[in-house]
Amino acid sequence: MGVSDMSISKEDLERMIAEVIESEGFELVEMKLAHHGKHHVLRIFADRVGGITLDQCGSLSRTLERKLDEVDPFDAAYTLEVSSPGLDRPLTTTADFRRKAGKNMRLLLETPVNGNDHAEGCLKAVEHDKLVLETDHGVVELTIDQVKHGKILY
């Protein structure tokens, strides 16, 4: 989507959407803009600790639609899609890990730690940029920078 297709910048749009989502008790995980011919698609992925339900996505979509109607950011027709980030989405940010504290996960590491390129266990805490993982071999503390991504184990 080109700049000429929008009446505000992508950054301003994302900031506005994040404010609306946060006012509803959720967090903006990702915003994607796409276009198919002259039709545009604005995809919003939202979440919070404990997850987001389908009904909550619907309510959030209606709230965002009202705000977008006020601002009218697009110079053409668009579709708004609001959903959860999905169960299998890789965890990469501190916020991603914070939302999933208490879950069992596998972390793929940027560089091996104690000869391992991964760590597996229950994420006990997220403290600033540090992850505290309880593994079968004891507690492991890693910084976000040491982790490529994490995946929830089901």
Image: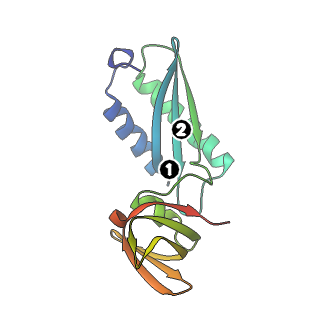
Query: Relative to the observer, which residue lies in front, 148 or 20?
Result: 148
Examine the image and state in which quarter residue 62 appears: top right
Residue at disc 2, secondary structure: helix
- Measured from the top left, where is residue 61 in percent x and y? 57, 37
Quadrant housing the C terminus: bottom right
The correct choice, above or below, for 122 with respect to 37 in the image is below
The correct choice, above or below, for 108 with respect to 74 in the image is below
Query: Relative to the observer, which residue lies in front, 106 or 104?
Result: 106
The correct choice, above or below, for 32 with respect to 85 in the image is above
CA neighbours of label 2 inside 10 A, class few (<14), some (14 to 19), many (20+): some
> Residue 87 bears which disc, if any?
none
Identify residue type, mark 2: Thr
- Measured from the top left, where is residue 68 in percent x and y? 46, 28
Sequence-wise first label, 1 or 2: 1
Residue at position x 56%, y 74% from top?
102
- Measured from the top left, where is residue 141 in percent x and y? 39, 79
Check disc 2 and report the residue beneath it: 63
The residue furthest bottom is: 138
Quadrant housing the N terminus: top left
Answer left or right for 69 relative to 129: right
The correct choice, above or below, for 123 with respect to 49 in the image is below
CA distance for labels 1 and 2: 9 Å
Residue at position x 33%, y 63% from top?
145
Residue at position x 42%, y 39% from top?
17
Q: Are marks 1 and 2 in contact (CB under 8 Å)?
A: yes
Check disc 1 and report the residue beneath it: 24
Query: Relative to the observer, which residue lies in front, 9 or 67?
Result: 9
Identify residue type, mark 1: Glu
Query: Relative to the observer, which residue lies in front, 43 or 121?
Result: 121
Answer left or right for 100 relative to 1: right
CA neighbours of label 1 inside 10 A, class few (<14), some (14 to 19), many (20+): few
